[in-house]
Image (cartoon, rainbow, N blue to C red):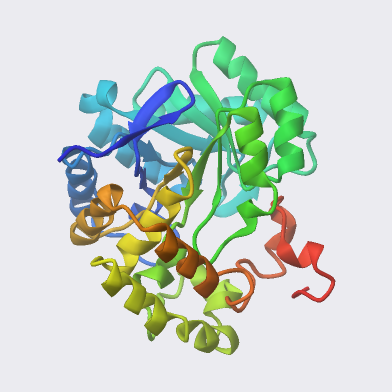
Amino acid sequence: MPLPMRRLGPFEVSALGLGCMNLSHAYGEPPPAEAAEALLLRALDLGVTLFDTAALYGFGVNESLVGRMLKPHRARITLASKCGMTGVEGKRVIDGRPATLKRTCEEALDRLQTEVIDLYYLHRWDRQVPIEESVGALGELVSEGKVKAIGLSEVSSATLRRAHAVHPITAVQNEYSLWTREPEIELLEECRRLGVAFVAFSPLGRGFLTGKLIEPAFAPKDIRLAMPRFQPEHFGRNLGLLPPYQALASEAACTPAQLALAWLLAKGDDIIPIPGTTCIGHLEEDLAAATLRLEEDLVRRLDALINEKTVAGDRYNAASRPEIDTERFSDRDPGGEP
């Protein structure tokens, strides 16, 4: 059965896209190239048309992988990548200067083996550069025919408004899942007011909502090691959410991962989750969620079970928070976590 489709600005894409980061970056040792290549092709076979990568992932390796494997199928897909956060001499650097963004785009076009990137995101807002200047540079890439549409990632509603006044923004890509509800503060409403699609990354709570991280044993370079929610003082409390959550998945006759994705899809036709995985079996499981339909009562019970008040720990540590522009519940609630 073909995947349902949704609108993403000028594009029509599969209701579930594929976040390609896991194949090269972030969650420990990436899979062998052959396994990563096979997963991309399997996603294509199953009807995925939105593939999301970035210059940061593997410091260019992920863009090269995606470009190499999907070039023969370029006309069938919507290709998204990101700039503004890259690897420089082995270190992650946020740089939103116009010259840097334009250079990064040229490098991405070469690695992706394409003449134009369909959707090009500013991966992070560089606070040393006015958002208007960074978006203005991306707008020039659109005028030059190197980019079709512009997106922003990890931004607030206020930053989105400023950016949209300079050049139309097609999509915002922020973290959103049952256990990361910050977009519900203001951003989703602002996206809808402006006609901006919302692309949800980490829709499975960085693996937590699969129900399989009961005793996580992360590899040394796994980024979750630095995330408060996975630290012992918070993770034990969060584990308490899983039994009733798994019971709701059983009630819906689906897996916990499918329930998390179906919940997001039920939140609006303008929301496009992009789960990532290194396992073809998990890919097939995730994509089966595209046709699930949840009863409104079940959605309400999920909302009540896992939310900003029941999840322990922030999603980023103190060192990373200054890089993130999104609204936070603790900023609005004087009694919330600092």
**Residue drawn at the location 55% of the way across and 28% of the way down:** 170
Q: Quadrant of the rendered structure where residue 218 is?
A: bottom left
**Residue drawn at the location 50% of the way across and 12% of the way down:** 145
* Rendered position, 259 above or below 186: below
**Residue drawn at the location 71% of the way across and 42% of the way down:** 157
Residue lying furthest top:
144
Q: In the picture, which quadrant includes the C terminus?
A: bottom right
As rendered, which of 316 and 37 lies closer to the eye? 316
Q: How many marks?
A: 0
Q: Answer with left or right where residue 28 lies relative to residue 151.
A: left
Give the percent coordinates (x, y) of residue 250: 27, 74
**Residue drawn at the location 54% of the way across and 54% of the way down:** 175
Q: Answer with left or right where residue 50 lies relative to residue 35.
A: right
Give the percent coordinates (x, y) of residue 134: 70, 29
Give the percent coordinates (x, y) of residue 33: 23, 51
Q: Quadrant of the rendered structure where residue 35 is?
A: bottom left
